[in-house]
Image (tube, grey):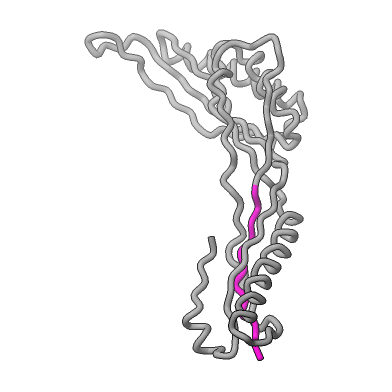
Amino acid sequence: MFSAHSEGIGHQRPNSIHVNGLGRVSVRPDKADINLAIEVHTRTAKAAREQAAAAMVAVIDAVKKMGIAEKDIQTSYVSLSPDYAEGNKIAGYQLSNQLIVGVRDVDKAGAVIDTAVQAGGNATRVQGMTFSVENPTEAQVLAREKAYEDALAKAKQYAKLAGVTLGRAMHITEGNNESRPPMPYATEAFQMVKRSVDTPVQVGEQEVSVAVDIVFGVE
């Protein structure tokens, strides 16, 4: 929450009331970022690379056919490491290739997951998913109105308590626009094989907030 520093401003504007306000607006997220991965365990590094590459190509092709744009598909992590057996001996190799898929039609998120799992087979992992508000401008406009109304209500109350007449807003400072962090969606169940029903995805709502710091004149 925005923290007002009223002492310094009070010295500069003695005939004033200094308050802050906070406006919150809940909106439906308009983007889902799905963290997909291919994980392969084989006896040789070459086989691990080849199998993982084939599975990931299948996943990428499948999600593209669902309308996911190239710009919304990004590799986030690639790792090749030994698998050790008893006695610290190398028993094989593990390759993990992770991909972030941005879904701009959040209602398709479940279908994208199902398609990816089907394409990648048992090597597919769904590591997580987050929702976000990509274009919060409209929500921020409403949040600013609420923040101003919140500050004004406080100023009116203080003016009444102090026995003075509230004047116009002399100085307005907006704090950092903020929204709650992207909402994680638990996906442990998706690490298993494909199910006979569509994967349910609850989009929910996300909060966009604006903080303001306002100095009102008094008479």
Quarter occupied by residue 204:
top right
**In the figure, 166 relative to 129: above or below?**
below
Q: Position of residue 26 (x, y in %)?
A: 69, 48
Q: Main secondary structure of the magenta part?
A: strand
For image coordinates 68% across by 84% down, the residue present is 166
When asked about the image quadrant of residue 90, the answer is top left
Q: Which x, y percent locates residue 103?
A: 70, 34
- Please identify the quarter of the rendering in which residue 161 is found: bottom right
69 or 19, nearer to the observer: 19
Question: From this viewpoint, which residue is outermost toward the left?
Answer: 87
196 drawn magenta? no
Looking at the picture, tell me which residue is in the foreground, 101 or 12: 12
- 52 or 170, which lies in front? 170
Instruction: Name the quadrant of the C terminus.
Output: bottom right
Residue at (53, 26) in percent of width and height: 127
Highlighted range, magenta: 207-219
Using the rendered image of the protein, determine whether residue 99 is visible from the camera's viewpoint: no
Position of residue 169 in the picture relative to residue 55 (left or right):
right
Q: Residue at x 65, y 86 (%)?
A: 217
Residue 98 drawn at (x, y percent): 53, 28
